[in-house]
Image (spheres, coloured by chain):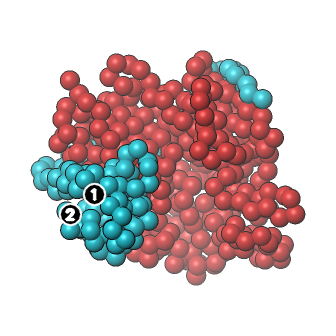
Chain colours: A red, B cyan
Amino acid sequence: MSSLYFFPFQAMGTDCAVHLYAADQAMAEHIARSAIAEVMRIEQRYSRYRPDSDLTAINRVAEMGGSIEVDDETAGLLNYALAAYRKSEGLFDISSGLLRRVWNFKGNELPDQKSLDELLSCVGLNKLIWQAPSLTFSVPGMELDFGGLGKEYAADRAAEVCFANGVEHGVIDLGGDIHVLGPHPDGNPWQIGIRHPRHPGKMMAVASIKQGALATSGDYERCIEVRSQRYSHILNPKTGWPVQGLSSISVIADRCLVAGSVSTIAMLKGLDGIEWLNNLGVDHCWMDENGRCRFVGSNEIFEIPSST
Amino acid sequence: MTNLFQTIDTAETGSISKQQFNQAFASLNPPGRFQSVGASAIFKQLDPQGTGSVSQSNFVSGMTALISSLGKTGTVASTSTATPPSQSLNQSQQSLERLGSPVSTSNGPGTVVNELI
């Protein structure tokens, strides 16, 4: 007979939690500690805020131009990022973080086009020469950011650690990036709330998931309003300007990394992301900037919350 | 533990707000195992109802339980038996690349289940 245990923690700048069923408290703690350690390990390696991270070492080379050799895990992340870049026809681009330098989402001014154009000359994964394990930055002044992948990848890894230690029923939640190991022991799915993009504290939907992953991209985390026009923090790496059209997209996939990158790509495509998602065949829900909302996928995965 | 509570409750109100707790957490330099959990997550455990404050009795009992929980030693569950990171990433890449291909669609494209507004 197993019981449900809950272990909250903080990582990657957000509230996180491990929920798992285990035979006893001690076993649950040991497994959760390993899962949390794996999340911390990934944060340590790929945080752009840490001067001792592997990503910072890569970006020191990127700034000057040149080559660096990376290990298998970093190579795997680069391969995945390039696959997402191809899947999105260049919209999902881990070199676009440079654009943050001119977009101040705490102010109320727009950047000038000249500054954006200068940065755009250093954006684009097509400027990299990648022959594993060697990564070459042909243009100096570039910068990579795994921020669009790291949390989702860490959720998958934490789930894999739990699974390797015998956990069959549990959820990893890294600030809304969710990996469900398996249903409750009675077979019932986990009920996962999806926040409303325009009403903090309210839910736009509840997803019932027995196994797999859920990730959400939204325009609500950081944005500015200038002359009655809303500008979200999700920037098109080809133009340097925020995308418009959709305010929130949640995607269910087998892995959180996939769910996260697919939801981000759909946001980057604006309203074209609706048809793109339909053609992928993934369960998803979206809300556009006018509040129009649709749930697409298997029966009863998404529900309107009974009380928000 | 009562002494710690009184140190944080500088206004002697008999309860600690989240802000007071966060300030104390930052200034008192707690052990690493507490820092890895973080002030926000610990306060959430002490104040599960989300009232925004913790009484002395709840603080003492909650912190005692937390110290016991975090301080236990024993064999840590293994990460070595988990899928290697590079293999995990390769599986994710394959999963991404399969999406949209004719064999990947479990539901068929665009099955609208529900619509709001």
Query: In which quadrant of the rendered image does the N terminus of chain B lie?
Result: bottom left
Q: Position of residue A267 (x, y in %)?
A: 70, 46
Instruction: Name the amino acid type tagged 2.
Output: Thr
Picture quadrant of residue A272: top right
The residue shown at (75%, 44%) is A246
Instruction: Name the amino acid type tagged 1.
Output: Gln
Label 2 Cα crowd, 10 Å radius (few <14 / some 14-19 / many 20+) = few
**Residue B2 shows which numbered tag?**
2
Q: Residue furthest bottom?
A: A64
Picture quadrant of residue B20: bottom left
Mark closest to the chain's N terminus, 1 or 2 = 2
The answer to which of A176 and A140 lies nearer the viewer is A176
What chain is tagged by disc 1? Answer: B
State yes or no: discs 1 and 2 in contact (Cβ < 8 Å): yes
The residue shown at (49%, 49%) is A175
Q: Residue furthest front?
A: B13
Element type at mark 1: helix
The residue shown at (17%, 42%) is A26
The answer to which of A217 and A14 lies nearer the viewer is A14
Q: Where is residue A52 in the image (x, y as percent from the top left)?
A: 40, 75
Q: Is residue A88 left or right of residue B7?
A: right
A54 shown above or below A286: below
Q: Where is residue A59 in the image (x, y as percent from the top left)?
A: 53, 73
User: Residue tagged by mark 1?
Assistant: B56
Q: Where is residue B79 in the image (x, y as percent from the top left)?
A: 26, 48
Q: Which residue lies furthest to the right in this view?
A: A227
The answer to which of B90 and A28 lies nearer the viewer is A28
Residue A200 visible here:
yes
Query: In which quadrant of the rendered image does the C terminus of chain B lie?
Result: top right
